[in-house]
Amino acid sequence: MKRRLAREKAFQTLFQMITTDLNQQAAMDYVLEEEENDPFLIQLVEGVTTHQKELDEWVAEHLENWSLERLPKVEKTVLRIAVFELKYEEDTPTQVAINEAVELAKTFGDEASGKFVNGVLSKMNE
């Protein structure tokens, strides 16, 4: 599985977890259907789940005129994945993590979602 697809599947899994009562494995099984688990996908899902409190704190520190609680679920999920990659995935270049997050936000949110995510992530890297 390519990394872009793994990020999309990780987003879908994490989104399922915050919008339903599915646990991590059930959400992953639901999203993957017949596909095999990918090591990068598992790393993203487990990493975001394990470090969610820290990730949320970092995101909250860089929000302007927003609170974490008010963030739409799409943006919150995308930002968690991106910040996990920025903080814990040393082999993912910063610009790649940001660009991939913006694309995820555009895919699963709307045009404003992509701009919002880009703004928050850019502010984190100043």
Image (cartoon, rainbow, N blue to C red):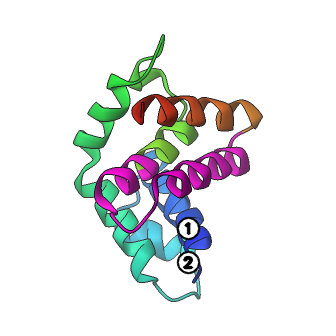
- Secondary structure of the residue carrying tag 2 is helix
Residue 84 image position (x, y, % from top left): 35, 53
Q: Residues within 10 Å of mark 2 (few under 14, many from 20)?
A: some
Residue 102 image position (x, y, % from top left): 63, 45
Instruction: State left or right for residue 109 relative to residue 52.
Output: right
Q: Nearer the viewer, residue 97 or 27?
A: 97
Q: Is residue 82 above or below residue 76?
A: below
The residue under label 1 is: 9
Q: Is residue 45 above or below residue 38?
A: above
Q: Quadrant of the C terminus?
A: top left
Q: Residues within 10 Å of mark 1 (few under 14, many from 20)?
A: many
Q: Are marks 1 and 2 in contact (CB under 8 Å)?
A: yes
| Residue stretch in magenta | 81-109
> Residue at 43% of width from left, 64% of height from top?
92
Q: Amino acid at mark 2?
A: Leu
> Residue at 40% of width from left, 82% of height from top?
39
> Residue at 32% of width from left, 24% of height from top?
61
- Of the two numbered discs 1 and 2 in the rendering, the one whose residue sits closer to the viewer: 1
Residue closest to the far front: 126
Q: Amino acid at mark 1?
A: Lys
